[in-house]
């Protein structure tokens, strides 16, 4: 949208300005500029940044392996979380040296089924005094269905850590970590529970 140029003073307004300016006593011995004499700074137009196109050959197959997920992966988010449990025990946990005392397999469940099952399992394990449990989510499907709305790959794998960080489970969960390869790797999580009081 273009701006309109500044309005010029009409002759009667110009005459009124001159009369007011003649009656005013200047603070410094300089002549005051008329409002019409003030120049506005001119804007320099921005040049658009053009991304270079990578070289290609006609008939070459397009690179269609795109991900719509701009958020950091769940593994990166969990890795960046601070360690809340004993560091020595956490090191043993990451190396797969601790054995889970219970396991929940959420394979094939929908979100509406998985969330209550996870709540029951974690709260029940905490009530039984268990400290380390394994929650298996699976890695999820490996491709987008191609619909107009992008789908997150591995919905349960992304949702379970979120559920573990909100009530009622956050009161009993001390640490969440991706499982060692012997316990499921990227498709499972270790859940280290607080001591029951």
Image: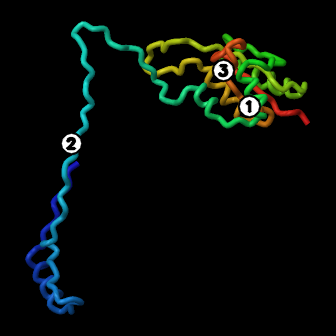
Q: Residue 108 vs residue 101: left or right?
A: left
Where residue 20 appears, as percent x and y from the top left, is: 18, 87
What element does badge 2 sit on?
loop
Q: Which residue bears the numbered disc 1?
A: 175
Residue located farthest toward the left when viewing the structure as drawn: 11
Tell me what residue is drawn at x 71 percent, y 12 percent.
182
Pair 3/2: label in front? 2
Viewer-proximal residue among 157 and 91: 91
What element does badge 3 sit on?
helix
Q: Quadrant of the C terminus?
A: top right
Q: CA distance from mark 1 to mark 3?
A: 22 Å
Q: Which residue bears the numbered disc 2?
A: 47
Residue 164 shows up from this direction: yes
Pair 1/2: label in front? 1
Q: Residue 193 vs residue 78: left or right?
A: right
Tell me what residue is drawn at x 80 percent, y 33 percent.
172
Q: Which residue bears the numbered disc 3?
A: 111
Viewer-proximal residue among 123 and 80: 80
- Quarter-wise, where is residue 98 in the image? top right
Q: CA distance from mark 3 to mark 2?
A: 48 Å
Viewer-proximal residue among 26 and 22: 26
Q: Are marks 3 and 2 in contact (CB under 8 Å)?
A: no
Q: Earlier in the sequence, mark 1 or mark 2?
A: 2
In the figure, 174 relative to 12: above or below? above
């Amino acid at each position: 949208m273009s701006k309109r140029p500044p309005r010029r003073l009409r002759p009667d307004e110009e005459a009124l300005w001159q009369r007011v300016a003649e009656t005013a006593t200047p603070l410094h011995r300089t002549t005051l500029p008329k409002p019409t004499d003030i120049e506005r700074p001119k804007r320099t137009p921005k040049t658009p940044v053009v991304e270079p196109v990578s070289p290609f050959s006609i008939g070459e197959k397009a690179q269609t392996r795109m991900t719509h997920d701009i958020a950091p992966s769940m593994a990166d988010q969990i890795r960046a979380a601070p360690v809340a449990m004993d560091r020595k025990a956490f090191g043993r946990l990451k190396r797969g040296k601790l054995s889970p005392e219970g396991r929940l397999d959420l394979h094939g469940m929908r979100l509406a089924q998985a969330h209550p099952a996870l709540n029951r399992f974690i709260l029940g394990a905490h009530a039984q005094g268990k400290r380390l449990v394994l929650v298996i989510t699976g890695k999820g499907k490996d491709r987008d269905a191609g619909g107009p709305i992008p789908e997150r790959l591995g919905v349960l794998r992304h949702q379970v850590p979120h559920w573990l960080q909100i009530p009622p489970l956050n009161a009993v969960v001390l640490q969440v970590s991706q499982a060692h390869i012997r316990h499921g790797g990227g498709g499972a999580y270790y859940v280290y529970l607080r001591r029951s009081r």
